[in-house]
Amino acid sequence: MSTAIINGHNNSTEDFTKHVFGGGPDNAEKVVEENKTCGKILTVLAWGLVVLTMPFSLFVCFKVVQEYERAVIFRLGRLLSGGAKGPGIFFILPCIDAYARVDLRTRTYDIPPQEVLTKDSVTVSVDAVVYYRVSNATVSIANVENAHHSTRLLAQTTLRNIMGQRPLHEILSERESISQHMKALLDEATDSWGINVERVEIKDVRLPVQLQRAMAAEAEAAREARAKVIAAEGEQKASRALREASEVIGDSPAALQLRYLQTLNTISAEKNSTIVFPLPIDMLTYFVKAKEAATAKANANSMYGNKE
């Protein structure tokens, strides 16, 4: 079985070679040699053109790239050996060389808001920021048509996929871990494109208005419940303290007088023009009873006078 497959593969390869080169491997080698020969001839002609048009050809042959740029050179459609050129001056041959500038600076991509259905079936709108740069200029040109556009599309889809795998409470509370996970996925996928993802930040998570109101009402109810519990505990502790204070004052009558003097000292320290003198309840009771006795006596006298 394996021998048949290998033979079939060899036959298909030979058929492909015959179709492309019009013959077998020998003919293919001849075509490759002819291409190399043509390339050498064109290279010699290009050098001859440079020499004949000297010094005007120097304005065409010498190029400059900035410190943050690299130049990827193609000679007769093939990558020139030695990798990307720059920064500074580099040399190209007219008519047979073409080059592409690659910016190595960090770029910022603001991912537009993505409508995502979370794991617990809640629709949220999430946006993020991705910071990336080109780490290999040659790979970014040769392996992908548009490295920047591909990275941005991948960032959008990765953000939707990650958010769809998590419930709402994790999205709201674990933004840092989500950002790190997204950065790792993007960096792994874009490594073959010559792109290095430096940082990913989740900007905002927008909830539906109805859900915001429901969560706000729930939080407010929880806060009110905690406030009532705390107030009740405070009243309980205050009542116990007052009971203990009343017991101390009841055992020592002088403590009431000291408390009275302390209160007067506090009032006078605030520079108030009004001073309050508290009166004992027993003294007030005495005056009330005396007034009631005088009123009863006056009523009795008036009754006796009417009878007479």
Image: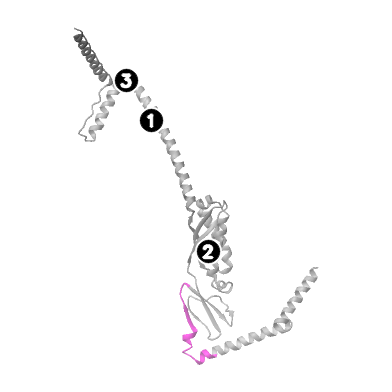
Q: Position of residue 107 (x, y in %)?
A: 48, 67
What amino acid type should be assigned to the residue bearing mark 1?
Ala
Q: Earlier in the sequence, mark 3 or mark 1?
A: 1
**For residue 104: magenta?**
no
User: Label 2 near label 3: C-beta < 8 Å?
Assistant: no
Q: Earlier in the sequence, mark 2 or mark 1?
A: 2
Quarter where residue 271 is shown: top left
Label 2 residue SS: strand
- Determine which residue is flagged by label 2: 197
What amino acid type should be assigned to the residue bearing mark 2?
Val
Quarter where residue 74 is shown: bottom right
Which region is colored magenta?
A: 48-68
Q: Position of residue 65 (x, y in %)?
A: 47, 77
User: Label 1 near label 3: C-beta < 8 Å?
Assistant: no
Q: Nearer the viewer, mark 3 or mark 1?
A: 1
Is 90 displayed left or right of 273 in the figure?
A: right
Is 74 displayed left or right of 206 in the figure?
A: right
What amino acid type should be assigned to the residue bearing mark 3?
Ser
Q: Residue at x 77, y 72 (%)?
A: 6
What is the number of the mark on residue 282? none
Identity of the residue furthest to the front in this view:
307
**Label 3 neighbour load within 10 Å: few <14, some 14-19, many 20+:** few
- Seen in the picture, residue 183 relative to 36 is either above or below; the reply is above
Q: Position of residue 61 (x, y in %)?
A: 50, 84
Q: Residue at x 28, y 25 (%)?
A: 258
Query: Could you tell me how far apart the alpha carbons at marks 3 and 1 are, in whole angstroms?
Result: 21 Å
- Determine which residue is flagged by label 3: 252
Q: Position of residue 110 (x, y in %)?
A: 48, 63
- Determine which residue is flagged by label 1: 238
Query: Could you tell me how far apart the alpha carbons at marks 3 and 2 are, in whole angstroms?
Result: 79 Å
